[in-house]
Image: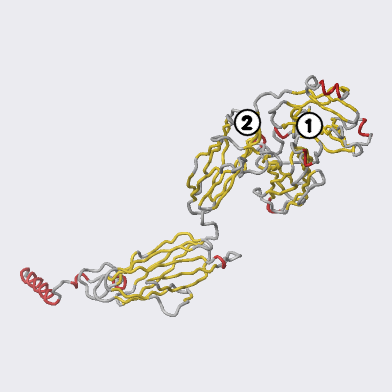
Amino acid sequence: MLQLLYMLLVLSQFIVLLICPNGVLAKETSPNRDIKKELNSEQVKPGTEGPILTVSPKEINLGIIGPGEGVRGNFVLKNAGSGILNWTVNGSEEWTFFDVKKLSGVLEKGTQNMGVHVSFLKDTLADNGGSNLIQLSLEADNRINIYRKRLSVGSHREMLKLSSNGGTRTIYVRFELTTGNYEPQIDVNPVRIDFGSVGQGESVRKKFQVTNSGRQILKWRIVVQPSAANGTANVSGKYISFFNEDIKGSGVYAAPNHLKVTLDMTGKWPESNGFPLSYVPSNVMKYHFWGTGIAVFCSTEKDEGDISAFVDEVYSIDPDCSNGQKVRAECLIAEGLPYGSHILTIINKGGSVVIEGVRIYGREIKKGATGWISVYPLSGTTTKEIDYVSVNINTKNLDPGYYGENITFNSNGGKVVAEVSLEVSSGIAPRIIDVYRFVSGYDYLYTANPQAESSLLNTKGFRKQGIAYRLFSSGTPGTTPFHRWYNATKKDHFYSSDIHGERKSLKGYVYEGAIGNIATSRLTNTRELYRWYNPSTGCHFYSTDLNESIIKKGYRFDGIAGYVK
C-alpha cells in the first residue's frame, strides 16, 4: 500500500513539470505585488530590447527660496535600452502652463539634461501671509516651458511626470518658501566706538560685533581706510558717545565721568543699554560744546518718538528730527556757527527717544601715525553666530589731540562703514597759568608773563589790575591755544581760541602769539570766560564776572571765549 502511494506522488510531480517546465507556478507573487512599480523600475537588465527611460535623481531639494530669489536644479535623462527614445514632460497638477507645446526631447545614446528653475516672484509677495506667485521653469536643449502657481510660505514637494515610449517616470522637486531674509545680510554693532580720553603711550582695545541676519553664509573682509591725500583723517568732526558702561542694566542713566561737566539733564532719564532714554515729554538735555556745528545721533522705539533740538536757542537747520530716526542716522542740528562755545538743547516732544551721542564739527581731527590702529581678524564667515572683531589703539607715537578713523566691512551681504574716535592726552597733570590784566585807556591786555612784556607795558602806560583768570599749559586735554592780536589804530587787543579769529574781521590786527591754553568745553572746576564789545570804541573786554562795572559803559555781550580756572 505504501509503495502505491509513493508511486502516485512521483507521478504527480512529473505531470507538473510537463505542464510548467520553468516552475513559475510555484513562485506566483502575492496579491500585493505592484506590477506598475516594477515596470517603472530603472534597474534594466542588459540586452533588453526597445528604449527605456531612466531619470536621475528621482528627487531634487532646492532648499530655501525667498522673495526675488530663484534656485536651479538638474535632472539627467538616459536611454537605458535600445532604439530611439521620445520623451515629454508635464508640469505638476494645478500649475498654469504658459507655452503652446510641452517640453520634449529625443534620446538614442548618451544622456540629456533637463533643468528646473523655481523662482519666488518678489512683486507678488502677499501682504497678509497668503499665497505668493511662484514660477517653475523646465529647460532642455535651449527650449523652455514656464508654469506658475500660487503657494503659501512653507515646505513644498511638487511632482513632474515624464512620458515616453520607454516608460513613464515620476520625479519630484522639493523647496521651502520664506518671506525672511535668505541672502546674507551683515550687521555691525556698534557702528561707532568712542574710546574717550586715552593717555599718551597707552594701548586700549574694544570690539565690534558682526552678525548675519540672512540665511546664507556671510563672507566679510575689513579695510581700514587710509587718511586722505592732504594728510587729514577721513572722518568729519569729533564723535562723542553718551554711553556709560558703569550704569548699563541699572535702569537709571547717569553721565560718565568725562561728561559730567558738559552734559546736563532735567527730568527722569532711564538708561537703554547704557544710553540715555527719555519717554516723558518736555524732558530736556543740554550739552556744552566748542566748535562750528553739531549733529545728534538718536533713535526712537517703534517710530513713535520725536525731538526738538537747537543750538544757543537760535541756530537750527532742522529743529524737528523726523519720527523713526535710526541709531545710524545723523540728525544735523546746526552748522556754520561762529567758532566758540555753544549749548545744544534737546527736548522730547513725545514718545521714547534714545540719545546715542553727538558729532561736533570745527575741531581738527588728526591723522594717526602708521600702525596706530590695528584690527583682528581682517576677514571671516558668519552664519548664525556672533563674530567679534577687536580694534586695538596704540597711542605711543601720537601727539595730544583728537583722532578718528573709518573701518569698512565689505561683504557679500552689504557694506558697513564703522568709526572709531578718541582723544589723546599728554598723561601729565596740567599746569595752571595765572593770567594778569593790564589796562591803558580802553585797551585791555592779558598776559601770563608780565616780566617778558615789561617794556611794552611801561612804554604804553598800562596799569596792572591783578589776576584776571587762569589758563592751562600747552597739551592739556580738552584745551587749545588762546591767541592774541593787537590793532594799533583802535588800540585794542582781541583774544580767541580760533587761529582765524572766529570769522571776524581782523583787518588792522597783528598776531602776537598765544598766551596759554583755554578749555573748549566745561572741564572740572572751570568757569566761563565772557567777552564784551564796545561798538563806539571798537575795543574788547574779557572777564569771568557777569557783574563787572565796565559792562554798563557801552559794552555789549559778545559770547563765551572759553572755559578757564
- Which is more N-terminal, label 1 or label 2? 2
SS for dot 2: loop
Give the colour scheme of this rendering: secondary structure
Q: Nearer the viewer, mark 2 or mark 1?
A: 1
Q: Residues within 10 Å of mark 2 (few under 14, many from 20)?
A: some
Vertical comparison of 119 with 352: above or below:
below
Vertical comparison of 287 with 398: above or below:
below
Image location (x, y in percent) of residue 329: 66, 50
Image location (x, y in percent) of residue 17: 12, 74
For the point 10% across and 71% down, which residue is it?
9
Query: Cα distance, mark 2 to mark 1?
Result: 24 Å
For badge 2, the amino acid type reads Asp
Residue under label 2, please give it.
399
Image location (x, y in percent) of residue 255: 71, 36
Vertical comparison of 491 with 36: above or below:
above
**Does the residue at mark 2 contact the one at mark 1 (Cβ under 8 Å)?**
no
SS for dot 1: strand
The quarter in which the C terminus is drawn is: top right
**Front in this rendered view, residue 158 or 220:** 220
Instruction: State the image quarter where residue 181 is shown.
Output: bottom right
Image location (x, y in percent) of residue 158: 44, 68
For the point 69% across and 30% down, which residue is it?
477
Q: Which mark is residue 229?
A: none
Q: Is residue 488 visible?
A: yes
Instruction: State the image quarter where residue 429 is shown.
Output: top right
Q: State left or right for residue 418 relative to residue 495.
A: left
Instruction: State the image quarter where residue 195 is shown.
Output: top right
Q: Is residue 32 visible?
A: no
For badge 1, the amino acid type reads Arg
**Front in this rendered view, residue 537 or 10:** 537
Q: Which mark is residue 484?
A: 1
Vertical comparison of 342 with 215: above or below:
above
